[in-house]
Amino acid sequence: MAVQPTPPPGGPVPAAPAAAAPLSSIAPAPASSPIAPPHEPALPWSENPNALPPVIAEKVRAFEEWAVINECEARQDTISFWMLKIPAILVCQFGTDRSGGK
């Protein structure tokens, strides 16, 4: 007497899918930019708020504000770094007596 295998708990296993069709046969080629026709220059997101959903537009505005603040902080950090680095370089170069103390 042959023993029959028990089916899996979720039901029968589906057959393997057929090979995927090429992408060009599934979806048509994308149209030109939906935001601005080719003859009009696209506006930055902050100048064209209707181009994005409100939630995404707010995230973009917040990101742009952060970028401006980050740029200012980076400039301040660079100035602070060089204000400390230049004196340290000068002391290392000219601050020690290289004649051996004689």
Image: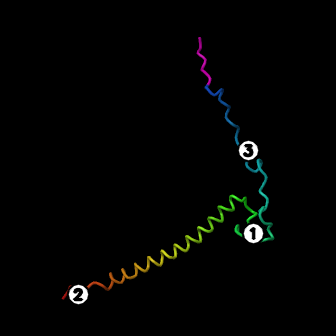
The amino acid on which the numbered mark 3 sits, given as a three-letter code, is: Ala
* Secondary structure type for disc 3: loop
Which of discs 3 and 1 lies nearer the camera? The answer is 1
Front residue of this view, candidates 15 and 82:
82
Which residue is found at the position 78% from the left and 55% from the top?
Answer: 29
Q: Please, is residue 63 above or below residue 13 in the view?
A: below
> In the image, is 89 to the left or to the right of 54?
left
Which residue is found at the position 59% from the left and 67% from the top?
Answer: 66
* Secondary structure type for disc 1: loop
3D distance between C-alphas at marks 3 and 2: 81 Å
Figure disc tally:
3
Sequence-earlier tag: 3 or 2: 3
Front residue of this view, candidates 1 and 75:
75
* Secondary structure type for disc 2: loop
Sequence-earlier tag: 3 or 1: 3
Q: Quadrant of residue 50?
A: bottom right
Sequence-earlier tag: 1 or 2: 1
3D distance between C-alphas at marks 1 and 2: 67 Å
For the view shown, which residue lies furthest in the top direction? 1
Per the image, the residue denoted by label 3 is: 21
The amino acid on which the numbered mark 2 sits, given as a three-letter code, is: Ser
- Kindly indicate whether the residue at mark 2 contacts the one at mark 3 (C-beta within 8 angstroms): no
Q: Percent position (x, y) of residue 92?
A: 32, 81
Which residue is found at the position 71% from the left and 43% from the top?
Answer: 20
Per the image, the residue denoted by label 1 is: 42
Per the image, the residue denoted by label 2 is: 99
**The magenta stretch spans which residues?**
1-7
Q: Percent position (x, y) of residue 67?
A: 59, 69
Q: Please, is residue 25 above or below residue 78 in the view?
A: above
Which residue is found at the position 65% from the left and 61% from the top?
Answer: 59
